[in-house]
Image (cartoon, grey):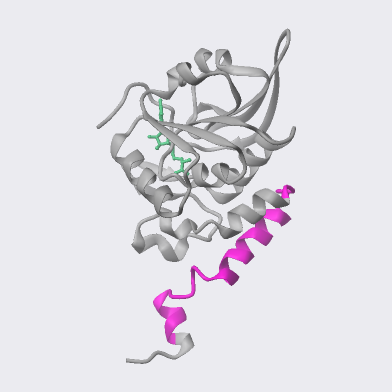
Amino acid sequence: MSYQSDDLQRLGIGMTSQRTRERLIQRLRDEGIGNEQVLEVMCSTPRHLFVDEALAHRAYEDTALPIGSNQTISQPYIVGRMTELLLADGPLDKVLEIGTGCGYQTAVLAQLVERVFSVERIQGLQERAKERLAELGIRNVLYRWSDGWEGWKTLAPYDGIIVTAAAKEIPQALLEQLAVGGRLVIPVGEDDEQKLLLIIREKNGFVHQVLNDVRFVPLLAGTLA
Ligand code: SAH
């Protein structure tokens, strides 16, 4: 059977094309994401492989999408914003990520820093993320199935920590596991009252900056098989 190109458009084929991806990247640039290295990595990372096939045609819209287990893949603008905030002071060696989810943010980060340590409380989600990243040839990530409220103490300190679920308050363990000079990017607050915070550890304490209004799923306690 052969299709005309407008048939293919109607079937949704082409919705994951390079042109579609570039349109998204231009939109992120227009909305203020200024780190071209971050944008380049996002342009070449196939977001459609991180969502269910039935949603693949929406993968290059600037929107969060469901990934199962009541969780979502973060909106591309937020992924870009959080990543550029983390990298704003120069290249990073060790980065701790809380909330592997489908692994999209993990994949973007892994291409921009030396090593990523990714913690997720839902085992099934993390297993699938691990497989996807292996298929994409991304090997500088270590995974741990555990409660991110505790961080990942044995491998601390970290030059950067990124949390992709909203915490009611800043987890003390994460502050303790941040290196001096390190940067923590975290959404804090409840339901529709969340702010993105950037916290920098200095020699004598922590400096906070309040940034975007955001909407994330909650950072929950405990683990789930
Ligand atoms: N960056 C992910 C975002 C997933 S949504 C992506 O783009 O796919 C947030 C994720 O945080 C969910 O997978 C959720 O299970 C996880 N999460 C929530 N509370 C957690 C906790 N205490 N420890 C680790 N992961 C947690």
Classify 139 as above or below 219.
below
Q: Nearer the viewer, residue 208 or 173?
A: 173
- Tell me the chief SS of the magenta region: helix
Give the residue displayed 63% in from the left and 66% down from the top: 23
Q: Position of residue 155 (x, y in %)?
A: 49, 20
With respect to residue 63, does 217 lie above or below? Answer: above
The image shows residue 167 at horizontal and vertical percentages of: 49, 24
Name the side, left or right, on which 34 lies relative to 186. right
Determine whether, in the image, residue 55 is placed left or right of residue 14: left
Q: Position of residue 98 (x, y in %)?
A: 47, 30
The N terminus - image quarter: bottom left
Tell me if residue 24 is in the magenta stretch: yes
Compared with residue 94, is residue 73 higher up or lower down, i.e. above or below?
Answer: below
User: Would you identify the image quadrant in which residue 225 lies?
Assistant: top left
Judge whether residue 137 is colored magenta: no
Q: Which residues are magenta?
A: 7-35
Residue at x 53% of width, y 61% of height: 60
Residue 42 coordinates in the image, percent (x, y)? 59, 54
Quadrant of picture, ligand 1: top left
Direction top: furthest residue: 204
**For the image shown, how many numbered marks are present on the structure?**
0
Between 141 and 148, which is closer to the camera in this rendering?
141
Residue drawn 74% across the image and 32% down it: 89
| Residue sitting farthest toward the left | 225
